[in-house]
Amino acid sequence: MVKRYLTVKALDEVFGLFGTAFDCVPSHEHLPLLESVGRVTAEPIFARYSVPEVHLAAMDGIAVISSETAGASEQNPITLDHAVRVNTGNIVPLPFDSVIMIEDVYLGEGRFTIRKAAPPWQHIRPAGEDIAESEMALPSRHCIRPAETGALAAYGITNLPVLAVRVGLIPTGSELVPHGTLPAPGQVVESNTVMAEAMIRVTGASCTRYPVVSDEPSLIRAALETAAAENEVVIISAGSSAGTKDYTADVIAELGEVLVHGVAIKPGKPVIIGRINKKPVIGMPGYPLSALTVLREIVMPLLQQYGLPVPLPVTISAQLTTSLHKEAGSDEFVLCSTGRVGDRFVISPQSRGAGVQMSAVRANAYLKLPAGSEGCEAGSRVEGRLTVPQEKAEKALLITGSHDPVIDHLTDLLQQRDLEVHSTHLGSMGGILALKKDECHAAPVHLIADDGSYNVPFLRKYLPGTELVLICVAERQQGIVSRGGIGLDELEERLFINRQRGSGTRMLLDHELKLRGIEPGSIRGYDREATTHLAVALAVKSGEADAGMCVYSAAKILGLPFVPVASERYELAIRREHIGDPRVSALVDVIGSAEFRAVLDRMGGYDSRETGTLRKLP
Amino acid sequence: MVKRYLTVKALDEVFGLFGTAFDCVPSHEHLPLLESVGRVTAEPIFARYSVPEVHLAAMDGIAVISSETAGASEQNPITLDHAVRVNTGNIVPLPFDSVIMIEDVYLGEGRFTIRKAAPPWQHIRPAGEDIAESEMALPSRHCIRPAETGALAAYGITNLPVLAVRVGLIPTGSELVPHGTLPAPGQVVESNTVMAEAMIRVTGASCTRYPVVSDEPSLIRAALETAAAENEVVIISAGSSAGTKDYTADVIAELGEVLVHGVAIKPGKPVIIGRINKKPVIGMPGYPLSALTVLREIVMPLLQQYGLPVPLPVTISAQLTTSLHKEAGSDEFVLCSTGRVGDRFVISPQSRGAGVQMSAVRANAYLKLPAGSEGCEAGSRVEGRLTVPQEKAEKALLITGSHDPVIDHLTDLLQQRDLEVHSTHLGSMGGILALKKDECHAAPVHLIADDGSYNVPFLRKYLPGTELVLICVAERQQGIVSRGGIGLDELEERLFINRQRGSGTRMLLDHELKLRGIEPGSIRGYDREATTHLAVALAVKSGEADAGMCVYSAAKILGLPFVPVASERYELAIRREHIGDPRVSALVDVIGSAEFRAVLDRMGGYDSRETGTLRKLP
């Protein structure tokens, strides 16, 4: 019943295997020129005729016989006996052998006068200047770029033989429903082969996504037989691990052989590399970020073996904000957010949970921590690999600290001004620490002090002497979300869900409990932590907890009752030195905009009278 | 009859105009998820439901009630009363609140025994862990990446609203025939709107290419009216200059207004920027490389104003091999070949002729020489902008020197081994100078010395003391190409076409003339220079000259008679220090291959007995 991986191979060994275990011979297809962009020539491409085919005027002017122009000068203008008006691109007929620009020609009584001699073949494009008939325009294995299609069109090339690889994608799993179906509880939308197709298409390979196959060995076997017959490469999604319903390895072994079961990468370890009729069959793990890693780190290099173009990420040198620890032995890949703060890039890990697909959305970079390493300490320089164009990473605005749903809407408004926003939810204290280390542009904070004032005492304590600006996002209402509409004084016998230590909401709760003389220890579930307002509301909605504290908008979105507890000042703390940064100016500008106020009013629970107010520290 | 540009605007002024003169409002379209990759969201996208919707097992194992596991240890195994087998992704039903990995579970008599306590919520993915119902998955103006399609599919997003811009392309010119037609002499295949479509498509904009319009103002006017009604942006190809048949500016002025006629860029100066009903109309010059420059430097930034993603080139710092001079006042763009030789990038300008489209094919980079500059000296550091991915530029093999058609076939074979080859044709002496400055990996040379020996005397003279390796490509036949089959002694009264100074072929001709006692001055056309063997043969074929000297293969390709003069040693000179470079090893390897010999035999005129032979200097 319990299977274990036979042997776990290092990633480098897997690459070595590609060259020897598989043929990796692409097929060819002929495509019309415009469709061939981004594809790779399968054969050399030759010009069908010379360009130009005959001598052409290279300027607007007159075609002349050069010998007739000899001796012309300002002092000795010559009126030509033979000359003909030509525009750029016109044929220069024999016996003409030179062109004079129209600007240098004087017309009088239907004849042309010139004041400068024209050497032979001046301003003429000789036949074949660009390319000669039968000359090689493109070699094999050339990736066709948009800007060269003009040349190819001009050379008479209307369609091209390009490399083609067919990849068959088989989703397996009895709990899966196809993309586009509303899942019932316990059902999951099949999304990994969608992602696989999107990623594989970039290389020019074509994908066939087969229907979802239940966890039945005979059905998986039939699907795999079909896919292996119809494609050069087959990917089976899920079932590659060692659970009771993981049949992928067995089925591959029946039809061919399993070469590798388990690769020393994280996420993505339970990957299978098999072979059927010399064709590679990849068993891709079911966890979305494991699948992503296997696609990027194993499937892409495999497709490169077929000669397909696989873009490599641009790398940047960045300062790591948080220590990352790992066990030696596996290459580990960590999705991150990166941006330039001051004069260097900083890079922050996203959630490392393999099921949190939003990490792939939020990330604009990733790190590879090599097998030999046990991790990296905060503050060290690391090489980030970008998942966005470099210019986007250069202008990323980093917001680190307390999360509020309104930050998403702020992001939306900022993106409309061509800014890339990356927010990391570490709670208010996390934001203050990021600000202290100058690792973000703005830190959303809402920390209540014993005297009931907000934020300033904490900033003075943790960033003494640092010049800061606080900009008010809103006065927002916090309260108790529940299914039954209970208040803070009615938590007895209820299961509570709290926010993480260091979050302003937890500190507000503690403050309010103290005011009411309630012992935190008396609240069941006080130690259970969620990291966002919506997560709290959702835990209540799903029955995981009976009550929690969050902002009004989170309760409203999920249609849950909300009993107010307190209103608090939700501000962005910014280092004064960054106020002049165009990203930060845009942020300040958007917070002060009518559009943003409209968002606050629409969401509810935000008092916008103080929105946009600046406070300066010290 | 002669029009001149009214005012020539600087490129920066043009960018300023975009924001004020045009609305630049994109339209929207809804696309299925997979088709939306690379496109930009028009609105924020929200999750349709929570993911996961219920608590799920995060591991293969057993679901347990955590309180029942308390106290379990190696010394005190506990056999559980309640537990249920779950695989990764299965629902964890109430009252279970923790999962224990299958590897840590011992099964006996149908019951599970554990040796370690399980804290609550261990290995469980709580509902909403990834995303909560109604949470913002993507903001507006987010460019969708392949790897995030999995997340979007999982969140129930099947199609997305994305930005759309329709661009109408009108080719004008009575000499034009549509792409796919064989042009008659004087006709030209319309290729600029093909290139425009390929380049514009990259941004996600869609293109309509209208039929070719003759140089008739009324027809151009009708086409422009239609295109302006059907698109957000219109590009008219050609007719933008000041020739007798350049009607574009007048027609735009009739239907709207001409804002700019002439921008201070080179190539591309005669561009028009006009406006019809607040929509931009670009008059694009007809020269292919002018059109390319206008598309890249003006149309792309314009599309960016609509929020479309326009990739910026990766830049590298490189050492310029050849001085580039220009007049101050215009931004000048120069297509180049670049590659890493030793420890730095070197960059060599391609032909600057605006009609030589092969430059766009051969180039893997370009330079921008700013308006204020008068050029750059050879040896200076410049910023190259890549037109290929950086990893391709990193592995470019640079071959500089004498051209032979066989070099194209060598390139083809090398590309099949995943090398990017860039060859620059500067003649044998140009190759030796590039080698001296260490600006290429290999220099093809065939220089005859007075004593009849090849190459070595020149290399010893120009690179004294430098360790070199010479690898023989072939002994090749040079001879006289003509339409009538004449030999070297029959040039009297014929019009000759020579090769450029410094080329080995010209030196061979001089050597052979001297042996025969023929005065170069007695040969008509001795001073007319072509730069390749094929160009010489083509000039003969087109009637531009009666005879020239070239290799046999060039005459053969064009079906012309060839009278042998001499055979010569065509070798690649390589610095010894680069022999270990993997690119150079591959080059040596390919020259020695049976495939390459087969190419030589097929082309004819090459004796392959010495092919692959190495000579070492000193």
Image: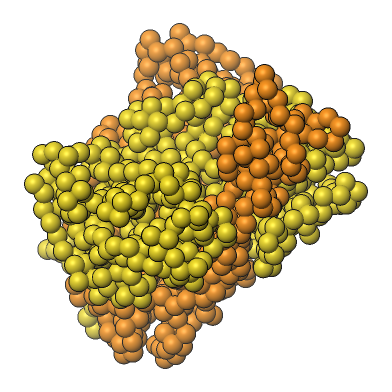
Chain colours: A orange, B yellow
Q: Residue at the far left: name it.
A: B618
Question: In percent of the image, x 24 and y 57: which residue is there?
Answer: B571
- Give whichever of B492, B44 is nearer the camera: B492
Horizontal side, residue A177 vs residue B281: left or right: left
Q: Is residue B457 visible?
A: yes
Eyeballing the image, is B205 above or below B382? below
Eyeballing the image, is A224 above or below B326? below
Q: From the image, which quarter does the N terminus of chain B lie in?
A: top right
Eyeballing the image, is A361 above or below B155? above
Question: In percent of the image, x 64 and y 24: which residue is there?
Answer: A73
- Give whichever of A281, A546 is nearer the camera: A281
Q: Position of residue A383 (x, y in %)?
A: 31, 41
**Image quadrant assignment for residue B604:** bottom left
Question: In percent of the image, x 72 and y 62: which residue is there?
Answer: B178
Q: Is residue B303 visible?
A: no
Q: Position of residue A359 (x, y in %)?
A: 45, 50
Q: Position of residue A228 (x, y in %)?
A: 41, 84
- Give whichever of B383, A416 is nearer the camera: B383
Horizontal side, residue A88 vs residue B448: left or right: right
Report the number of discs.
Answer: 0
Eyeballing the image, is B107 above or below B53? below
Q: Position of residue B464 (x, y in %)?
A: 13, 38
Question: In percent of the image, x 39 and y 49: which residue is there?
Answer: B425
